[in-house]
Image (cartoon, grey):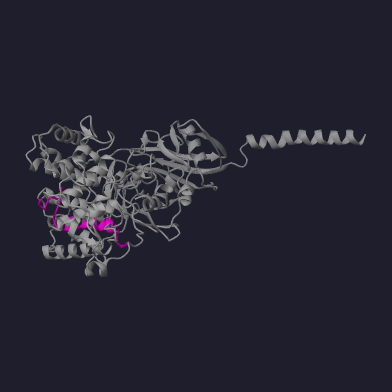
Amino acid sequence: MYFRKLQKSFLLFLVIFIAWVIPSFSRGEGDVNVSIRIEGSNSTIFDGNVSVSNCTVTDSSGNTHEFSSTAICALDKAAKQGNFSYALKDYGFGLFLEKIASDETPSDFSKSWSFWVNYDSSSVGADTYQLKKDDQLLFAFSAYPAIPLKVTAPENAVLGTPLTFIAEKRTGTLDEQYVWHGTWENAAGATFYLGSKTISVPEDGKVTLTFSEPISENYWAENEGFVKSEIGKLIISAETSPSPTASPTTSPTATPSPSPSFSPSPTASPFVSTLKISDETLNNSANKGLAFLRSKQDSSGSIDGYATTAWAIMAFGANNDRASTITNGYSLLDALKKSEVESATDIERMILAIRASGNNPKSFNGKNYIKLLLMKYEDNQFGDKNLINDDIFGVLAMLSADENVDRSEIKNTVSTIISKQKDDGAFENLDLTAAAIQALKAYQSKEGSIPVDDSLSKAKAYLREHQDSFGGFGENSASTSWAIQALLSLGENPNDWQVGDSNPWTALLRFQNSDGGFSWKSPGSSSPFMTTYAVPALLKTFWPINKLEMETTPIEMSSPTPTAETQSTAAPSPTVSSPTIAGITTSKTSPKSKPINSPTESPESNISESETILEPRQIPNSENNQSSNTVIALFTVSNVGIGVLVQRILAKLFV
């Protein structure tokens, strides 16, 4: 009897459980509601709210992975609501977000998907981050570092009353434990859009407007190299009562952003400043930069790894200094000889460095690097068919070695480069536009048969339109250095490119620190990598750097015989906490082998193959005691906040 009563009680409990508990799951109790915005290269892919719980995702190999209320589940839910696809790849130490919609990470990682939570770069990957109620998630496809923009609208909007919009950018730094500390700064130089109207954001970041007629328009902010802000809606009715203006659009479906005509941001002012930078000032600055580089050379002859060493050789070559004479035990040239290259961009950087050192790229250390580069030529271009950086530097490398300007590989690649120029004159971005100008001008100066005047004219106009409020370019030393070299190659005087009382020279000099080194941002820590970019520009030299007469006899590896001078000045490479930017990348960071450095000053650069060219933005070295276990833990979906942590650590471990 007792057993039957117990059995009935259990059945009753089971019925109640099924009737009450199970439906609660179907009602979504326990789900986490968050907003998610996905900014692609040309449009907003998704901007809306999703309710997230558990999810199962499939990687590119067909394997499934289960997660519980992580950011990757929010992406999966958004993909279903917005009807777009995404791709994840499992490299054996965590998932990597390769693609959303049509934006796929290229082989050189010059662009990738970054992941932000509440406008701060995530310290863990999207597959690891545990969602919290009302989190704001942002995925953005851009070069590293991704810097989000934000526009704050006035609380009330009334006809005839001045309205002030505040445009800001999210910047930050990493402490010694790689913890990100973000802050909002005025986004001076960005472009504020209101419908089809464009306004350059002034120095204080505030755009003040007064409307005399009713209006209903979207507003947002954009800038070269930044992540577009969320789109808001400005509504002012005929009534005098205020109406809300800061309500962002939250459609759960894909919402492509408008494509209004671009307005210079800012353009050079007609005011001509009396401030002109003298050659003496530039030379003194360059000498301080070279002294800084000497102080960072280690006993192997290297300066902060292969990539920086190669760029350093070009910097010293711009000063007519042979790499074989820059020693601290071994020389810069010895360090270059130890470098192993495989990708097109690595080979191109090597050729440029060899020639800048006064040596022959066709016979260096027992190798013919021109022949190696030609093996990367296919379908009228060098290297990856989807990239233009390896084409630009391929032409520069070939011309630096005095190859015949009429040979088909050069002519065809020049045609390919020109074909990829955008309507606004850009070659993909600011850095590559500056590099392309130098390549096309070098081709023209050797009397190449393909007309390039029109392309150069449009590219020059693009630089003019993208001069920043400090007179430089991109608000960083790397982009400013490259752009100055481009102007010099065109025969322009940077002193004449005035913005208010500033020009490209004054902009570049503001990045130099008291130790002679240059930082990526101002203020910022001195970076050998950034300094290698600045010195050639200060010496009024542009690519290819062929000042030194080519050696005719092979140079053997030097014996370690440091001089008293080098012994006293050489110091271990310091920890660099700021990013590195424009440049050439290395294949060492590719997941196919070892992770690759991404271009940028990564938060410190502008960079390439890991940097833009050959390194579209290289990451500065940090502490050398990070374990491989740390990398495995961090290298997860969306590059772990794409680059803020992983890229820095990988750069140190694998460069």
Q: Closest to the observer: 518 or 292?
A: 292
Report the side of 65 relative to 383 (left or right).
Answer: right
Q: In which quarter of the image is residue 326?
A: bottom left
| Position of 252 relative to 210 (above/below) | above
Which quarter shows the N terminus?
Answer: top right
Q: Closest to the observer: 67 or 11?
A: 67
Evaluate whether residue 146 shows in this view: yes
State the image coordinates of residue 166 (x, y, percent, origin top left).
Answer: 35, 54
Q: Which residue lies furthest to the left in this view?
A: 447
Report the side of 494 relative to 265 (left or right).
Answer: left
- The residue stretch that appears in magenta: 520-549
Q: Quadrant of residue 394?
A: top left
Question: Residue at horizontal 14%, vertical 43%?
Answer: 401
| Position of 350 relative to 271 (above/below) | above
Evaluate whether residue 510 shows in this view: no
State the image coordinates of residue 155 (x, y, percent, origin top left).
Answer: 42, 52
Question: Residue at horizontal 74%, vertical 36%?
Answer: 17
Q: Which residue lies furthest to the right in this view?
A: 1
Report the side of 122 relative to 614 (left or right).
Answer: right
| Position of 300 relative to 586 (above/below) | below
State the image coordinates of residue 507 (x, y, percent, origin top left).
Answer: 22, 59
Membership of 396 in magenta stretch: no
Give the overall secondary structure of the magenta segment.
loop
Membership of 526 in magenta stretch: yes
Q: Closest to the observer: 236 or 121?
A: 121
State the image coordinates of residue 639 (x, y, percent, origin top left).
Answer: 42, 45
